[in-house]
């Protein structure tokens, strides 16, 4: 797990957007699983995102009119896999400790639970890369620590690469490596 650390405006979200194939670089090369993506057509980028990348946002971005289980299953529906992978959303909810909350709507969940549903949704299609943009920004300290601990567990369980943008230096200390950004530039990086 790598923590991208920096204040607001330091470039964390921009870097995640570039790595997540949401924006294109003005120069340089971006590789996802060995594939250079900066020159791909939008349709091809969509396929890379759907197959290789999971996203977690600060506000969880759950759809309020569908259940937690249905929110988790959305990426499979977009990929045309909903019929063949009916158990995957249930299993992923169980993995994030919310097996019993699948029938609840987002408004019926706590902030920490909503964020875990968002993490389950980001991982249900088994991406190789998880990009999390300030996923603990709206959570209290205890839930923030739980989310980072969950990321560490998921890295071990799924051999997953996780990049987490945060301004919280304490939480960043839970990452295997920290990369510090200032004014759009990496100023220092290190491990443990």
Image (cartoon, helix red, strand yellow):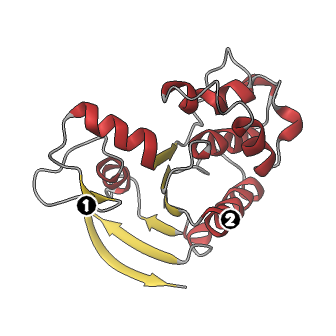
Residue 172, percent from left and from top: 56, 70
Residue 185 picture location, percent across and down:
25, 67
Q: Secondary structure at mark 2?
A: helix
Q: Residue at x 49, y 77 (%)?
A: 177
User: Circle 1 — which element?
Assistant: loop
Disc on res. 157: 2
- Report whether 173 appears left or right of 66: left
Identify residue for label 1. Answer: 184
The number of discs equals: 2
Residue at image point 23% right, 33% down: 42
Judging depth in this view, the residue of 181 and 48 nearest the camera is 48
Q: Quadrant of the N terminus?
A: bottom right
Figure quadrant of residue 60: top right
For the residue carrying disc 1, how many other residues have a C-alpha within 10 Å: few (<14), some (14-19), or many (20+)? some
| In the image, residue 117 above or below residue 106 | below
Q: Relative to 186, is 179 on the left or the right?
A: right
Task: Name the quadrant of the C terminus.
Answer: bottom right
In primary-sequence order, the first of circles 2 and 1 is: 2
Report the side of 173 relative to 179 (left or right): right
Q: Position of residue 27 (x, y in %)?
A: 10, 56
Q: Which-is-in-front pick, marks 2 and 1?
A: 2
Left or right? Give the position of 183 relative to 56. Answer: left
- Give the residue drawn at x 70%, y 45%: 116
Furthest-top residue in view? 65
The Cα atoms of the two marked residues, 2 and 1, are separated by 32 Å
Q: Quadrant of residue 73 in the image?
A: top right
* Cβ atoms under marks 2 and 1 closer than 8 Å: no
Q: Nearer the viewer, residue 191 or 184?
A: 191
* Viewer-proximal residue among 187 and 24: 24
Task: Please tell me how crowded label 2 is: few (under 14), some (14-19), or many (20+) other residues with Cα within 10 Å.
Answer: few
Q: Picture coordinates of residue 170 (x, y %)?
A: 61, 71
């Amino acid at each position: 797990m790598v923590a991208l650390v920096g204040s607001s405006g330091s470039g964390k979200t921009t870097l995640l957007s570039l790595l997540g194939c949401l924006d294109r670089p003005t120069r340089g090369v971006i590789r996802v699983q060995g594939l250079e993506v900066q020159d791909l057509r939008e349709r091809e980028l969509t396929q890379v995102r759907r197959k290789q990348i999971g996203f977690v946002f600060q506000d969880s971005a759950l759809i309020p009119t569908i259940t937690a289980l249905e929110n988790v299953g959305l990426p499979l529906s977009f990929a045309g896999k909903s019929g063949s992978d009916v158990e995957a959303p249930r299993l992923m909810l169980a993995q994030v400790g919310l097996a019993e909350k699948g029938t609840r709507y987002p408004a019926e969940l706590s902030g920490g639970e909503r964020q875990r549903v968002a993490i389950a949704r980001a991982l249900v299609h088994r991406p190789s890369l998880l990009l999390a943009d300030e996923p603990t920004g709206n959570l209290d300290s205890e839930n923030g620590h739980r989310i980072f601990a969950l990321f560490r567990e998921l890295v071990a369980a799924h051999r997953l690469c996780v990049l987490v943008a945060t301004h919280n230096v304490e939480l960043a200390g839970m990452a295997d490596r920290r990369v510090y950004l200032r004014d759009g530039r990496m100023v220092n990086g290190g491990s443990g």
